[in-house]
Amino acid sequence: MLELKNINKYYNAGTVNEMCLFQDFNLSIDDHEFVSVVGSNGSGKTSMLNIICGSIPVDSGTISINGQDITKMPEFVRQRRIGRVYQNPAMGTCPHMTILENMSLADNKGKPFNLLPGTNKKRIDFYREQLKTLGLGLEDKLHVKVGVLSGGQRQAMALLMSTMTPIEFLILDEHTAALDPKTAETIMILTDRIVKEKKLTTVMVTHNLRYAVEYGDRLLMMHQGHAVVDKKGPEKAAMKVDDILDQFNAISIECGN
């Protein structure tokens, strides 16, 4: 279980631009839950992911995984248990390295760096099999540099690479937002399959309301650092896109937009 307890986070504290993003924010995510998170810009969606991953510190409160306090744990240590895919396909792969080198890099995540070759030739067939599951023909392009691939191919690789080593959590930060509609559909189908096969606890931030409704077993709507909607199980399954739109419209009117 992932727990955020009494989280407080201020930006530009002590200045005229001080902004309170989270005040006594609490959230618990059960093992193997797939949580879709929606909300307007500035609602706290990505900041929540950054807090979970350790990319930004909290001012007070605790973050724990299965009872272990990780609040002060460095980001690079948390990454051994957390896989993350970003909105920009370029952020999850190394463009000047080949597909094989990228796969080897992901395969060695969390392992000690020794004076050994970066690519284990005994693992090449394994990499081919993993890439074959994407259905994009990348298994036949191991020596092609990743920088020449399409955004969709790179994002598919980033998703695969982030889940190659044993992880407990998968963090998806608008990972289909930069893709064309057809490619986005492909990545979402792939995401759903990987999450189910590996039984990953997943948090997905998205602006695509249909994806938020169709995928996952829990839906959160963030607004001004609070979860104003939290539906799971049968309640989440019964939700429709229009339900979320109605809530967005209500918030927009409340904010004077």
Image (cartoon, helix red, strand yellow):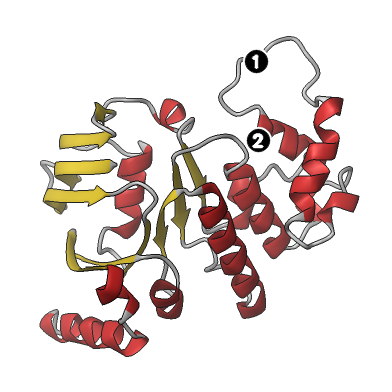
Any part of residue 110 in sight = yes
* On-image quarter of the C terminus: bottom left
Q: Position of residue 234 (x, y in %)?
A: 28, 74
- In percent of the image, x 79 and y 38: which residue is there? 126
Residue sitting at x 59%, y 35%? 165
- Give coordinates of residue 219: x percent, y percent: 31, 67
Secondary structure of the residue carrying numbered label 1: loop
**Camera-side residue: 135 or 208?**
135
Task: Give how far apart the Cα atoms at labels 1 and 2 are.
Answer: 13 Å
Residue at point 17% right, 80% down? 251
Query: Which element is circle 2 on?
Result: helix
Relative horizontal placement of residue 158, taking residue 150 as reference (left or right): left
Q: How many marks?
A: 2
User: Which amino acid type corresponds to the residue marked 2 in the rendered image?
Assistant: Ala
Left or right: where 77 falls relative to 112: left
Q: Is residue 112 above or below residue 223?
A: above
Can the viewer see residue 98? Answer: no
Which badge, 1 or 2, is on the more N-terminal residue? Answer: 2
Q: Residue at x 47, y 33 (%)?
A: 79
Residue 188 falls left or right of residue 52: right
Whole-percent x and y of residue 149?
78, 57
Quadrant of the snapshot with the N terminus: top left
Q: Which residue is mark 2?
A: 106
Nearer to me, 209 or 19: 209
Quadrant for residue 185, please give it.
Answer: bottom right
Q: Residue 82's x, y, as percent?
A: 45, 39
Q: Which three-letter amino acid code belongs to the residue tagged 1? A: Phe
Q: Kindly identify which residue carries mark 1.
A: 113
Residue 40: which quarter of the image? bottom left
